[in-house]
Image (spheres, rainbow, N blue to C red):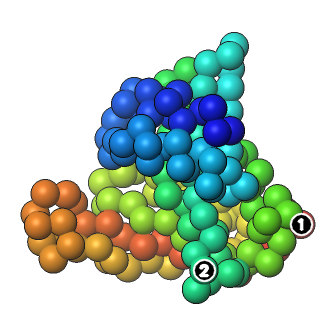
C-alpha cells in the first residue's frame, strides 16, 4: 500500500468535497496506517480508499479518517465493503466501535455510516466535535463525531 500514496492524493483531488492532504500525509496514510486502511482498484485504477487508525487511548475503536470513492466505483456498495474489510482484519480483533467525523451536509457519508451501523447491528450516536469558529477559525464547517458500536465481527 505504501506505493499508493500519490495515487491516493490524485483520487482525493477527484472526489470533492473531500479535504485534500499533502502528498506526504497520503504517503504516511498508506504506510504507517496500512493495516487500518484499504484500497480498491478497478482496471488498475485506484477507485476507492479508506484511511483510518486505532487511537492509542481507545484500543477498542477504529477511527476512519477519510473515505474516498471515485465516480467509477460509486453505487456498488464499495465504501461499506471497505469498512467491513477493515474491521475484519487481525489488527482490529479487539475493536468493537468505529468513529469518524462528518460535516452536517455530507449526505453520502451520513448514509454510508448509518447503513454500516445497521448492518453491524450497532447503535450510531453523534455530537458536534470540531466547531466551525472555535476549531476551524470559520474556514471549515463543523465536524460531527459519529460513534458506532458496540458491534461484533460476525456480521
Q: Is residue 71 above or below residue 15?
A: above
Image vertical order of residue 104 relative to residue 66, above or below: below
Judged left or right of residue 111, residue 35 is right
Can residue 137 be seen from the camera position used here? yes
User: Would residue 94 be found to the left or right of residue 4 on screen?
Assistant: right
Which of 111 and 44 lies nearest the eye of the viewer?
Answer: 44
Residue at horizontal 60%, vertical 26%?
46
Q: Position of residue 27 (x, y in %)?
A: 52, 42
Structural crowding at the residue carrying mark 2, measured as other residues with C-alpha within 10 Å and reported as few (<14), some (14–19) or many (≥20)? few
Q: Could you tell whether 19 is left or right of 69 in the image? A: left
Instruction: Tell me if mark 1 has few (under 14), some (14-19) or many (20+) residues whose alpha carbon lies within 10 angstroms of its own.
Output: few
For the view shown, which residue lies furthest in the top direction? 43
Give the quadrant of residue 32: bottom right
As drawn, the residue found furthest toward the right would be: 154
Residue 25 on image: x %, y %: 44, 48
Residue where numbered disc 1 is placed:
154
Residue at (58%, 75%) from the top-left corner? 55
For disc 2, the marked residue is 56
Task: Judge depth for marks 2 and 1 and give the one in front.
Answer: 2
Quadrant where the C terminus is found in the figure: bottom right
Q: Earlier in the sequence, mark 2 or mark 1?
A: 2
What percent of the width, then of the height, locates residue 73?
A: 59, 27
Residue 105, image x, y percentages:
30, 54
Q: Is residue 88 visible?
A: no
Q: Residue at x 64, y 39 (%)?
A: 2
Point 53% across, 28% down: residue: 7
Amino acid at each position: 500500500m505504501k506505493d499508493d500514496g500519490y495515487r491516493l492524493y490524485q483520487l482525493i483531488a477527484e472526489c470533492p468535497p473531500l479535504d485534500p492532504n499533502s502528498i506526504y500525509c497520503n504517503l504516511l496514510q498508506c504506510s504507517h496506517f496500512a493495516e487500518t486502511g484499504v484500497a480498491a482498484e478497478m482496471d488498475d485504477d485506484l477507485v476507492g480508499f479508506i484511511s483510518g487508525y486505532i487511537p492509542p487511548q481507545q484500543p477498542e475503536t477504529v477511527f476512519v479518517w477519510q473515505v474516498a470513492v471515485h465516480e467509477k466505483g460509486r453505487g456498488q456498495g464499495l465504501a461499506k465493503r471497505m469498512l467491513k474489510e477493515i474491521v475484519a482484519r487481525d489488527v482490529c480483533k479487539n475493536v468493537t466501535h468505529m468513529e469518524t467525523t462528518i460535516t452536517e451536509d455530507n449526505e453520502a457519508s451520513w448514509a454510508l455510516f448509518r447503513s454500516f451501523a445497521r448492518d453491524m447491528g450497532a447503535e450510531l450516536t453523534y455530537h458536534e466535535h470540531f466547531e466551525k469558529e472555535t476549531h476551524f477559525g470559520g474556514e471549515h464547517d463543523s465536524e460531527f463525531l459519529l460513534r458506532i458500536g458496540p458491534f461484533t465481527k460476525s456480521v
